Image (cartoon, rainbow, N blue to C red):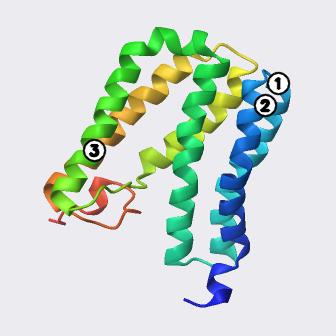
Amino acid sequence: MTKSEILTVPNGLSVSRIILLPVLYVFALRGMELAFVIAYAIVGATDYFDGLVARRFNQKTTFGKALDSIADLPFYVSSAYFLARLYPQYLRPNRILLIAFFALLGASFVVSAIKCRKPIMMHTFLLKLNGVLVYFCVIASYFFDTTLFIAGILFIYFVAFVEEILIFIKYGEVDPDTPTIYRILPKK
């Protein structure tokens, strides 16, 4: 891998998501909700723009894909924390759904670790959709009651994790960017 493959704008955007995450924690912990929402919107937008720039300027690399996933994980885990910290009233009614969410997430990692000899994070269409929905949910929670929105997101996650588990069980290790199980089903 060359220096020019590593030092790209998309990779810089992914790294910025990691570097700026502590700023979001400072705003959330200090109760600076408006500053948090503005900063969160900007930091989260880097997830969209890193892929857009990589595709548009032909800067897609294996390293960039891995870096994007590495940046996504703490950002989206932190998003759950931010919701819990800033808007617990919207999460409380969804406690049982949240427990089921974490159980299915854990099951997905266990199944992939067993079937593929390593835990894998898929990027199916439903999981990407949920990433976008979580992003907008955190922002919308500043303005509206998002209790039902959160329940909807968790339901979509259930379907996505079941699909992911089925992919691992039936096909083992596949391209993590496989959009859906229907793409890998044998054609008749």
CB of mark 1 within 8 Å of CB of mark 2? yes
Indicate left or right for 126 with 162 as reference. right
The residue positioned 67% from the left and 62% from the top of the image is 15
In the image, residue 159 lies at what x, y percent?
33, 36
Check disc 3 and give the amino acid type: Ser
Residue 19 numbered mark, or none: none
Callout 2: few (<14), some (14-19), or many (20+) C-alpha neighbours within 10 Å?
some
The residue positioned 36% from the left and 31% from the top of the image is 102
The residue positioned 40% from the left and 35% from the top of the image is 157
Q: Is residue 86 above or below residue 26?
A: above
For disc 3, the marked residue is 108
Q: In which quarter of the image is the N terminus?
A: bottom right
User: Which residue is nearer to you in this view: 43 or 170?
Assistant: 43
Check disc 1 and give the amino acid type: Met
In the image, residue 64 lies at what x, y percent?
57, 71
Indicate left or right for 134 with 172 as reference. right
The residue positioned 32% from the left and 41% from the top of the image is 161
- Name the N-terminal-most of marks 3 and 1: 1
For disc 2, the marked residue is 27
Distance of label 3 from label 1 (alpha carbons): 35 Å
Q: Does the rendering let one see residue 167?
A: no
Indicate left or right for 148 with 173 as reference. right
Check disc 2 and give the amino acid type: Phe
Distance of label 1 from label 2 (alpha carbons): 5 Å
For disc 1, the marked residue is 32
Q: Does the rendering let one see residue 143?
A: yes
In the image, residue 88 lies at what x, y percent?
59, 14
